[in-house]
Image (spheres, rainbow, N blue to C red):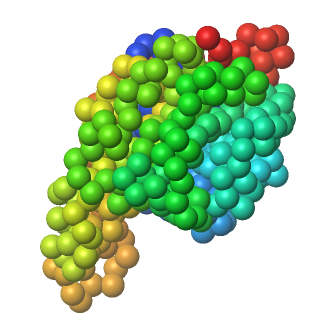
Amino acid sequence: MALISLRQLLDHAGENGYGMPAFNITNLETLQSVMQAADKTNSPVLLQASRSARKYVDDIFIKHMFMAAAERYPHLPVCVHLDHGNELSTCMSAMELGFTSVMMDGSLMADAKTPSDYDYNVSETKAVVEMAHARGVSVEGEIGVLGSLETGEGEKEDGHGFEGKLEKKQLLTDPQEARSFVEATGVDALAVAIGTSHGAYKFSRQPSGDILAMDLIDEIHALLPNTHLVMHGASTIPQDLQALINDNGGDIPTTFGVPLQEVERGIKNGVRKVNIDTDIRMAMSGCMRKFLSENRSTFDLRAILQPGRERVVTLCSERNERFGCAGMADKIRPLTLPQMADRYAAGQMRAVA
C-alpha cells in the first residue's frame, strides 16, 4: 500500500515537468472511477475530500474508503489530501484519519466565508505546517481569494466561499505577497487566485486574459521557481457534459470552464496540482439522467450508476494523459511519512526561491 505525501508527489512532478489532477471524491463510485483511470494510465493518484464530503460520507467511512483504494491498487502511489481545511483542528482531524496532506485555507476566516488578512493567514497556516511537518504530512496554503473576476463574487460550493463582492485586487494573488507567504509559512504547495472559482458557473464566455489571469501564474513562478503552484476551480465544464444534462431534463445555462490548453500552459509554468470536482459531478449526474430517461422502469442503483462510472474513468484518464502524469506511477519510489518528517526536521524540504 503506497500512501505518499503531496510534497513527494509534487516534487516528482516538478522534476519531470508534469501536473497532477487532484480529483475530489464524493462517494464510492467516484473513488472507484478515479482509481480505475489511474490504473489504466499507470498514473500516481491525488485524492481529495472536502469538509462537506467528509461530513456526507462520514469520517470513518472515508478513512477506510481511501485506505482500501490504496490497498486495492498497491502498485500506485496514492496521496490523500484534505481540500480547504478551515482551521487547525480540521487539519489535525484529517491527519489523525490518515490523510497524508492537508490544505489550510487561511485566505478566509474559520467560518469559511469571511476574507481574512495576511497576518491571520500566515499565523494559521504556519501553525498547521509545524504540526503537519512533524508527522511528515504536507501542507497546501492559499494566498488571494478564489472568486470570479467577471462578477467579483465567489461560488459558495460545499459551504466554502466568501459572501458578497470583492475588489479585483483581492481576487488576484499578489506575487510579492506570495513570495513572503511561502517564506514565512514553509508550505509545500501554494494555491493562487487568478479568476477561477468553484462550481459550474465560472465564466459567461470563453475566458481570456481579462477574466482568467494566466499571466499572473507566469509572474509568480518567476519569483517562486521552486514552489509548487495549485489551480483551484480548474474543471473544464465540457460542452458535451452540459448538453448531456440538458438533453435529459436538466437546465444548466451555457457556461465555460478553464480550457485544457490553459491548464497545460500553467503546468509549463509551475502549476503542479490542478483541482477537479465539477467535471466529475457533471459526468456522473448527466449519465444518471440519461439512463433514467431511457430506462423508466429501472430501480437498480448499480445499473443507474454504472454509465457514470465509465464516463468518469474516461474523463480522468484524459486528464492524466493531458497533464503528463500518465506513465509516472512506477517511476516514484514512495517515502513513508516518518521518512518525510526526518527530511523536514533536517531542513531539506524548504520550497523557496
Q: Could you tell me which residue is drawn at 27 percent across and 84 percent down?
A: 298
In this view, 1 is above or below 99:
above
Of the pair 284 and 215, the residue shown nearer to us: 215
Q: Tell me, yes or no, if residue 57 can be seen here.
A: no
Q: Quadrant of the C terminus?
A: top right
> In the shown orientation, is residue 315 left or right of residue 84?
left
Q: Could you tell me which residue is drawn at 72 percent across and 20 percent down?
A: 183
> In the shown orientation, is residue 182 left or right of residue 14?
right
x, y percent for residue 131: 84, 35
Of the pair 130 and 258, the residue shown nearer to us: 258
**Res. 105 image quadrant:** top right
Of the pair 27 and 225, the residue shown nearer to us: 225
In this view, 28 is above or below 141:
below
In this view, 56 is above or below 266:
below
Q: Quadrant of the N terminus?
A: top right
In this view, 127 is above or below 134:
below
Q: Could you tell me which residue is drawn at 69 percent across and 23 percent down?
A: 180
x, y percent for residue 132: 78, 34
x, y percent for residue 133: 78, 28
> In the shown orientation, is residue 169 left or right of residue 86?
left
Q: Residue furthest bottom?
A: 297
x, y percent for residue 65: 59, 54
Q: Tell me, yes or no, if residue 295 can be seen here.
A: yes
> In the shown orientation, is residue 176 left or right of residue 323?
right
Q: Could you tell me which residue is drawn at 19 percent across and 76 percent down?
A: 248
Number of dots carrying numbers: 0
